[in-house]
Image (cartoon, grey):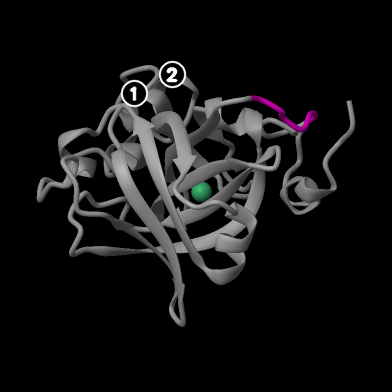
Amino acid sequence: MMKSMALEKYRSRRNFSVTPEPQGARIARRKKLIFVVQKHQASRLHYDFRLEWNGVLLSWAIPKGPSLDPSVKRLAMHVEDHPIEYASFEGVIPEGEYGGGTVMVWDKGAWEPEVEDVDEALRKGDLKFTLFGKKLTGSWVLVRTKLGWLLIKHRDDSASKDDITITEPRSAISKKLLREIARAHGGDVARAAKADP
Ligand code: MN
């Protein structure tokens, strides 16, 4: 299968003979669009928010993680596209490698755009969408401002004042805490434990 030129930046930053992260050998074509949120204890803790689009995962790094409170705007730094297979990556990126640290699949599910033209919405910097995750559901928006992109929950039944990063700290696929993932994959358990509530 053809390798995606869109993933060149992703690949150039990684030494795949050292890191267990996927190379992204294929460009995905599937019916339901997937999303994933990966809790990533790199040099700093952040949550990587990824939406499948055009065969890759559009990606934003959210330092504080998503909030269910519609009055809270979470800074979301746009980062390089990732391969679709990355959505299942949970484990440890070796220290010294790009993004070195422990990665958890914190949430995963399907997403649907609430706009007719996703590419146009991304160009305009105003993408409304619905999430069907295990933790994140309902209506959301990614909006581009002078400060960067912001992830904001819309007011609906799934809005809440609860801090879901605290109340739901476990992996959506393995049910492990970050320190348990670090332990299972030979990572820095003490450092990962700092990111568990
Ligand atoms: Mn990351």
- Point 47% across, 39% down: residue: 112
Residue placed furthest toward the front: 116
Residue 51 is situated, as x and y percent measured from the top left of the image, at: 53, 43
Instruction: For label 2, count other residues whose C-alpha is less than 10 Å away and answer few (under 14), some (14-19) or many (20+).
Output: few
Given residues 2 and 96, the one toward you in this image is: 2
Mark on residue 92? none
Instruction: For label 1, count other residues whose C-alpha is less than 10 Å away and answer few (under 14), some (14-19) or many (20+).
Output: many
Q: Secondary structure at mark 1?
A: helix
Residue type marked 1: Glu
When asked about the image quadrant of residue 172, the answer is top left
Which residue, given by chain and number where applicable, does mark 1 sit on? 180
Is 103 displayed left or right of 25 in the figure?
Answer: left
Above or below, 163 relative to 21: below
Disc 2 versus disc 1: distance between alpha carbons?
6 Å
Given residues 141 and 69, the one toward you in this image is: 141
Is 42 displayed left or right of 85 in the figure?
Answer: left
Q: Quadrant of the C terminus?
A: top left
Given residues 44 and 51, the one toward you in this image is: 51
Q: Which residues are magenta?
A: 25-30
In reply to whether residue 159 is colored magenta, the answer given is: no
Cβ atoms at labels 2 and 1 below 8 Å apart = yes
Above or below, 182 relative to 95: above
- Point 86% across, 36% down: residue: 3
Magenta region, mostly helix, strand or loop? loop
- Point 19% across, 47% down: residue: 156
Mark on residue 184? 2
- Point 76% across, 41% down: residue: 15
